[in-house]
Amino acid sequence: MQILVTGGAGFIGGNFVHLTVKERPEARIVVLDAMTYAGNERSLDGLGEHVELVRGDIADAALVDRLVAASDLVVHFAAESHNDNSLAEPWPFVQTNIVGTYTLLEAARKHDVRYHHISTDEVYGDLELDDPERFTEATAYNPSSPYSSTKAGSDMLVRAWVRSFGVRATISNCSNNYGPRQHIEKFIPRQITNLIDGVRPKLYGDGLNVRDWIHVDDHNSAVWAIIERGRIGETYLIGADGELDNKTVVQAILTGMGRDADDFDHVTDRPGHDRRYAIDSTKLRQELGWSPRYTSFDDGLAATIAWYRENESWWRPFKDATEAKYASQQVVAA
Ligand code: NAD
Ligand code: DAU
C-alpha cells in the first residue's frame, strides 16, 4: 500500500508517519511537505526506506496529480495551523487550507483515490464555560478566526466533493493535541521550552480558556480507525475527555518542571480568543470501537516535558525567532 501523507514533516503528520511505520511496516509512505517554518525534516529521522520526503506545495496541481495517481490513500494533514499567525497574516491560510485542499480533492476525484481529511474542533466556534453541551457531528459550523474559518471552508469542500463527485472521503475534527515534535509556537511546548530557558510561562488574558487535550498518538490511532472502518462521507469527532483551563495546564507544567505553580505572567489576550472547546466523541467510540490510550494528562505531559528536555537540538534552532514574533505582539500585564 502506498500512502501520501501531506504535512508529514509537521507535528501531527510526523507522528502519524512514525506510528504507521511502527504498526504497518508493509506500507510505503510518501510525505508531501512544503517545509514551511513549521516543517522539520528531523521529525522524520530514523524512518529509513519506509518514507520518502517530497518537498512541494499541496497547491501545485501537477505535482499533486502525479503523487495522488501513484497512491492508494491520501491522508491530508498539511495546513497553516496557528491561530496567532492567522490573525497577523491571513492569506497563507486561505491559500494552503482552501486552495491546497481543493487541489488534493481534484486529484483524488480524477484518480478515484481514498482520501482522509484532518480537521479541527475549532470549526464549531466556542462554548461558554458553563455550557453543559459539547460539540458533536451535528453542531453547526461557527468558526471565529482566519485559521478556523479556512479549515471550515476546507471541510465544506470535502463534503461537496463527496456528494457531487463521489469522492471516497472521510473527515475527522479533533481537539487540541499535545506530545512530542510539536512546534514551539504552540501553548504547551512554548511554556516547556521557556522554562528550560529560565523564562516565565505566558498566559493569554485571564487564563481561564478551556481546551480539550488529547495525546497526538491517540488522535492518530483514531485516524487509522476511521480510515479502516469509517463510513465514506462521514465526519467523526476525535476527543479524549481532556478539558482543562490554560492556567491549570501552565501550573501542571511548572510543577512538573520543579517550579513554583504561580511563577507565570499574564500577557495580552488573543483577539477573538475562543473561550472553550469540548468534544463528544461518542460516535467514534461506539461505531468504530476506538478509545484513547493516554488517559492521564499528567503522565502524557511528563513524557512530553521529558521529550523536549532530551531533544533540544530539534527545537533550539527555532526558539529565538518564535519568541521574537511573540514579543512584537504581546505585552506582560502589570
Ligand atoms: P503543523 O503546523 O505542525 O504542521 C503543518 C505541516 O504542513 C508543516 O510540516 C508544514 O510545512 C506543512 N505545510 C504547510 N503548508 C503547506 C503547503 N502549502 N504544502 C505542503 N505542506 C505544507 O500542524 P499540526 O499541528 O501538525 O496540524 C496538522 C493538521 O491537523 C492541520 O490540518 C490542523 O488543522 C489539524 N489539527 C491540528 C490540531 C492541533 O492541536 N495541532 C488539532 C486538530 C486538528
Ligand atoms: O482545537 C484544535 C486546535 O488547537 C488546532 O486546530 C490548532 O491547529 C492548534 O494550534 C490548537 O489551537 P489553539 O489556538 O487552541 O492552540 P494554541 O496552542 O495556540 O493555544 C492553546 C491555548 O493556550 C489557547 O487558549 C491560547 C493559549 N495560549 C497560547 C499560547 C501560545 C496562552 O495562554 N499562551 C501562549 O503562549
Image: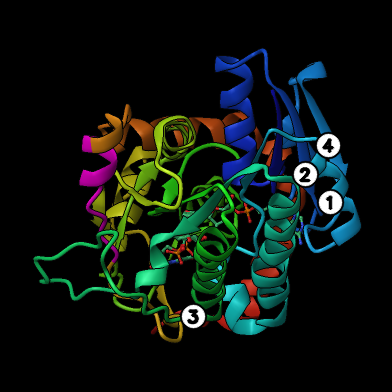
For ligand 2, tell me if the residue under mark 3 lies within 8 Å.
yes
Tell whether position 128 is magenta. no
Which residue carries the number 1 mark? 65
User: The C terminus is located in which quarter?
Assistant: bottom left
x%, y% of residue 291? 28, 31
Residue appearing at x 38%, y 61% in the figure = 121
Q: Which stretch did the figure color magenta? A: 277-286
Which residue carries the number 2 mark? 68
Residue appearing at x 81%, y 54% in the figure = 34
Count of marks placed on residues: 4
| Sequence-first tag of 1 and 3 | 1
User: The N terminus is located in which quarter?
Assistant: top right
Viewer can see residue 142: yes
Q: CA distance from mark 4 to mark 2?
A: 14 Å
The secondary element bearing badge 4 is classed as strand
x%, y% of residue 194? 54, 54
Three-letter amino acid code of the residue under disc 1 = Asp
Q: Are marks 1 and 2 in contact (CB under 8 Å)?
A: yes
Closer to the observer: label 4 or label 2?
A: 2
Using a 10 Å C-alpha cutoff, classify the residue at mark 3 as few (fewer than 14 neighbours), some (14 to 19) or many (20 or more): many
